[in-house]
């Protein structure tokens, strides 16, 4: 490095600074430790877990679909304009001699509104301007305006708000299902975090137990060597101790691998890092498992699960959706009977042509009384002329009228959803019962393993004292050490299993969000 500095003629002070910066960057790029409580781990998972993020987007999409469905009831406005000109040789005595010329312009605007009962209402305003050199006209140019109201209403098929609003109803049902799915995914993620967190704690604590056991074996090996040197023990005694040290060193390797596996699993759930970066972060759980006895009433737990489990809520929503689809299918089997009502008011204006002697047959125009497009608008808006029409249209779809396959399919889907709901309820009851029984069993196991660990500690203490006075051998001391290590590991596993059983109970009851005061609004929000 010094030779490179000299070659580039970099001042020595600058080279030292560069080396220090490089060292700091290398230090920052190295592994870093993150102390993490269970609550912090859950909070991070709610913000960054990829499965949750995807589910949030799915729920937002379902929410937007409701807005899209509602937009179908927003009024629509149509505006049109047209213009034409016709010029040709006159072919009638009514037309002017020589060349007949006619030009027209038309304007129209139409406002259409869907109605909640299934019909449509439209209001239109149209104007028609005509100008030609045709003979014997009373108005030229002429202005025709029409204000029109049209109402169409289905009376059988597609009648009523439940049919007319089907897009909105389906979108709301899908949103409710999507929201329940998000809730279910949040609960599953929280449980996965707890499971991964406590399994990491178990792996790390088990590693500590193995390390303590190895240290005891190494201490015993050093003590045995000294005793052999002074002749207090036979040289063959060292073989058992050396074998125990080697075995426990191998157990350390396996325990370290278990820690890495458990740590990587938690990192992935938290979306902490990815790929090769997994090795650059080390998680240090800051919490230890505690034994908090709980009593659960099975009957009350079953009722709670029926009310709050999101998967059961999804089944109920699915049945509601299938029942609506069945009702909609029945409606679509009805004949199509439509009521069509129209009312319109015309307005006519233009330049009134004045003929000599008030005789249009002479064909000599001597003057004009000017008119305007506005005059035709005014007449149309005054409703001077009542024009209306009413008609009914009946359409019978023979395929639907004869066949009932669509209705049978909808009925089958409804029955299928109801059967799945019953099956899921039974499965939920089984899961709750197993979770309650598991908590009671593990509570007893924690106490039993605690007592076993205390006896193992006393046994090791007694064997160590006996060895000191020559009443036993290394074999029994090493055996007592292994039993103590196994007892400590078993007690720790029972304690963590008990904590996980409590989390499992919260999950199968559907109360995990309430107990942790988590709302769906917190998911995926920065």
Image (tube, grey):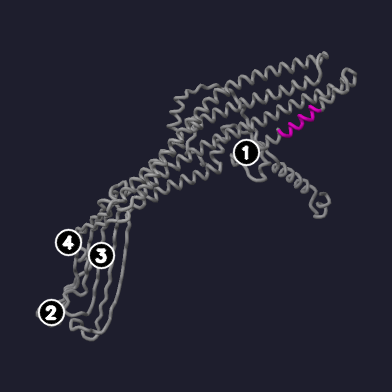
At which x and y percent is residue 448? 62, 19
SS at badge 3: strand
Instruction: Report the Cα–Cα distance between label 2 and label 1.
Output: 99 Å
Q: Are marks 4 and 2 in contact (CB under 8 Å)?
A: no
Can residue 496 be seen from the camera position used here? yes
Crowdedness near tag 2: few (<14), some (14–19) or many (≥20) residues, C-alpha within 10 Å: some
Q: Mark 1 or 3, which is nearer the eye?
A: 1
Instruction: Look at the image and say whether residue 252 sits in the magenta stretch.
Output: yes
Q: Which residue is mark 1?
A: 265
What segment is highlighted magenta in the picture? 243-254
Which mark is on residue 506? none
Crowdedness near tag 3: few (<14), some (14–19) or many (≥20) residues, C-alpha within 10 Å: some
Report whether 473 appears left or right of 126: right
Q: Mark 1 or 4, which is nearer the eye?
A: 1
Q: Which residue is mark 3?
A: 126
Q: Mark 4 or 2, which is nearer the eye?
A: 4
At which x and y percent is residue 143? 22, 69
Question: What residue is at 32 percent from the left and 46 percent from the top?
Answer: 162
């Amino acid at each position: 490095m010094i030779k490179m500095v000299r070659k580039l003629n970099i001042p020595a002070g600058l080279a030292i600074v560069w080396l220090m910066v490089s060292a700091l960057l290398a230090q920052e790029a190295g592994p870093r430790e993150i102390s993490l409580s269970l609550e912090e781990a859950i909070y991070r998972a709610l913000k960054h877990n990829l499965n949750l993020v995807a589910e949030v987007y799915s729920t937002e999409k379902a929410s937007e679909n409701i807005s899209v469905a509602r937009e179908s009831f927003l009024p629509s406005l149509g505006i049109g304009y047209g213009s034409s000109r016709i010029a040709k040789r006159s072919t009638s005595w009514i037309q002017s001699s020589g060349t007949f010329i006619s030009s027209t312009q038309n304007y129209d605007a139409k406002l259409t509104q869907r109605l909640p009962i299934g019909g449509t209402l439209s209001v239109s305003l149209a104007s028609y301007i005509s100008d030609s050199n045709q003979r014997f006209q009373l108005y030229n140019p002429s202005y025709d305006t029409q204000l029109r109201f049209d109402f169409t209403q289905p009376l059988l098929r597609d009648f009523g708000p439940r049919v007319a609003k089907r897009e909105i109803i389906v979108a709301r049902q899908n949103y409710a299902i999507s929201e329940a799915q998000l809730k279910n995914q949040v609960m599953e993620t929280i449980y996965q975090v707890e499971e991964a967190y406590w399994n990491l704690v178990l792996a790390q604590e088990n590693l500590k137990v193995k390390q303590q056991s190895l240290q005891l074996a190494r201490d015993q090996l050093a003590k045995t060597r000294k005793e052999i040197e002074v002749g207090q023990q036979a040289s063959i005694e060292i073989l058992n101790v050396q074998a125990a040290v080697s075995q426990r060193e191998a157990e350390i390797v396996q325990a370290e691998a278990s820690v890495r596996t458990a740590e990587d699993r938690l990192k992935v759930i938290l979306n902490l890092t990815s790929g090769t970066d997994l090795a650059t972060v080390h998680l240090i759980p800051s919490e230890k498992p505690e034994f908090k006895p709980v009593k659960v009433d099975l009957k009350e737990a079953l009722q709670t699960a029926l009310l709050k489990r999101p998967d059961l809520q999804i089944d109920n929503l699915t049945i509601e959706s299938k029942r609506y689809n069945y009702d909609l299918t029945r409606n679509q089997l009805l004949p199509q009977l439509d009521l069509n009502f129209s009312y319109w008011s015309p307005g006519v204006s233009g330049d009134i042509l004045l003929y000599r002697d008030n005789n249009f047959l002479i064909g000599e125009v001597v003057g004009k009384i000017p008119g305007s497009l506005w005059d035709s608008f005014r007449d149309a808006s005054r409703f001077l002329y009542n024009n209306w029409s009413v008609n009914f249209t009946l359409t019978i779809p023979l395929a639907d009228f004869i066949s009932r396959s669509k209705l049978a399919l909808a009925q089958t889907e409804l029955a299928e959803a109801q059967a799945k709901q019953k099956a899921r309820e039974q499965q939920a009851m089984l899961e709750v019962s197993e979770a309650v029984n598991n908590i009671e069993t593990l509570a007893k196991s924690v106490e039993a393993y605690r007592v076993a660990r205390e006896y193992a500690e006393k046994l090791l203490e007694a064997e160590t004292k006996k060895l000191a006075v020559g009443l036993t051998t290394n074999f029994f001391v090493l055996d007592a050490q292994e039993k103590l290590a196994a007892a400590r590991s078993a007690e720790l596993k029972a304690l963590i299993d008990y904590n996980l059983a409590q989390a499992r109970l919260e999950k199968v009851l559907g109360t995990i969000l309430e107990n942790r005061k988590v709302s769906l609004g917190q998911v995926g929000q920065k």
